Image: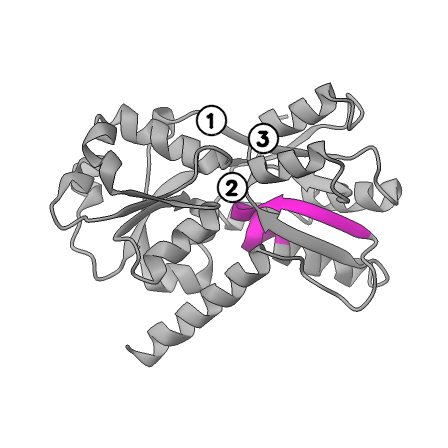
């Protein structure tokens, strides 16, 4: 394997290891965050900027599938702030009485892309998702639609293109959208349907190429969150939320391909 390819693989695997556990610091974090896996690279940058402004505030982040976090939070998992890949889960938590009715917020709109190795000869620009019917495509990775919003979006896009039933037996499922990217990067899948925000990470962008799936082929992915009623320090959680939604966080979200919600 080429040295650069090995390095990129190592970087991705290290990032994905962090998704399965918390970004740890020596101090107990003042804010504990559960965040959708598609936020991995963007939120990491936002937190660095936030801590540069507030050096005394420690932030701990766990990345994963939004549906998995919803199940954990329904059982009072000890997170203060939840950034979901869709608004359904925050709204359900409010309905269950786990957050104040006015605590929900939208931070971005996500986008779905096809992601393949740069050496792939598949022509999505010309054929769209019909290119998945090429016999060379043996496995297609998507996030598990049972608990990952990007997985449900991927299923919807495949059905809209009329290829879902033809490729269903070739689908492999990642626990979350970041693991879906890992499947492609490690050769376990030929193609992945992943978040644009992950594909735009410099290391992943250098390794693979993307084709943005038309937004009218899957439900609009309004991503939002809330502060849980049992947050240890609500004011600090609000400060991080406001930083992400404000003029400091917006440019970072845009750079990773997120559209910003209209006022």
Residue 138 x/y as whole percent: 19, 49
Residue 248 visible in the picture = yes
Q: 116 above or below 13?
A: above
Query: Is residue 69 one of those drawn in magenta?
Result: no
Q: Nearer the viewer, mark 3 or mark 1?
A: 1
Q: Is residue 33 magenta?
A: yes
Residue under the image location 25 percent in, 34 percent down: 168
Residue 261: which disc?
Answer: 3
Judging from the image, what secondary structure is the residue with disc 3 in?
loop
Q: Which residues are magenta?
A: 31-43
User: Is there CB contact under 8 Å for labels 2 and 1?
Assistant: no
Q: Quadrant of the N terminus?
A: bottom left
Q: Secondary structure at mark 1?
A: loop
Q: CA distance from mark 3 to mark 1?
A: 11 Å
User: Mark 2 and mark 1: span between their CA atoms?
Assistant: 12 Å
Q: Which mark is residue 220?
A: 1
Q: Which residue is mark 2?
A: 258
Q: Helix, strand, or loop for circle 2?
A: loop
């Amino acid at each position: 394997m080429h040295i650069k390819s090995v390095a990129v693989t190592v970087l991705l695997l290290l990032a994905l290891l962090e998704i399965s556990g918390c970004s740890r610091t020596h101090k107990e974090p003042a804010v504990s965050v559960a965040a959708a896996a598609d936020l991995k690279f963007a939120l990491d940058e936002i937190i660095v900027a936030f801590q540069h402004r507030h050096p005394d505030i420690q932030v701990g982040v766990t990345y994963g599938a939004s549906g998995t976090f919803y199940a954990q939070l329904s059982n009072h998992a000890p997170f203060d702030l939840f950034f979901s890949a869709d608004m359904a889960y925050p709204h359900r938590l409010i309905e269950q009485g786990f957050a104040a009715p006015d605590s929900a917020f939208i931070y971005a709109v996500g986008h779905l892309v096809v992601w393949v190795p740069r050496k792939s000869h598949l022509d999505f620009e010309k054929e769209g998702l019909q290119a998945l019917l090429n016999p060379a495509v043996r496995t297609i990775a998507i996030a598990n639609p049972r608990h990952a919003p990007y997985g449900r979006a991927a299923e919807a896009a495949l059905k809209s293109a009329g290829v879902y039933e033809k490729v269903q037996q070739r689908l492999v499922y990642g626990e979350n959208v970041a693991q879906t990217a890992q499947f492609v990067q490690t050769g376990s899948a030929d193609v992945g349907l992943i978040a644009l925000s992950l594909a735009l990470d410099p290391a992943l962008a250098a390794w693979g190429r993307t084709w943005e799936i038309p937004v009218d082929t899957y439900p609009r992915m309004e991503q939002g969150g809330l502060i849980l009623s049992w947050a240890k320090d609500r004011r600090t959680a609000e400060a991080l939320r406001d930083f992400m939604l404000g003029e400091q966080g917006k440019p970072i979200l845009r750079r990773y391909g997120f559209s910003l919600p209209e006022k």
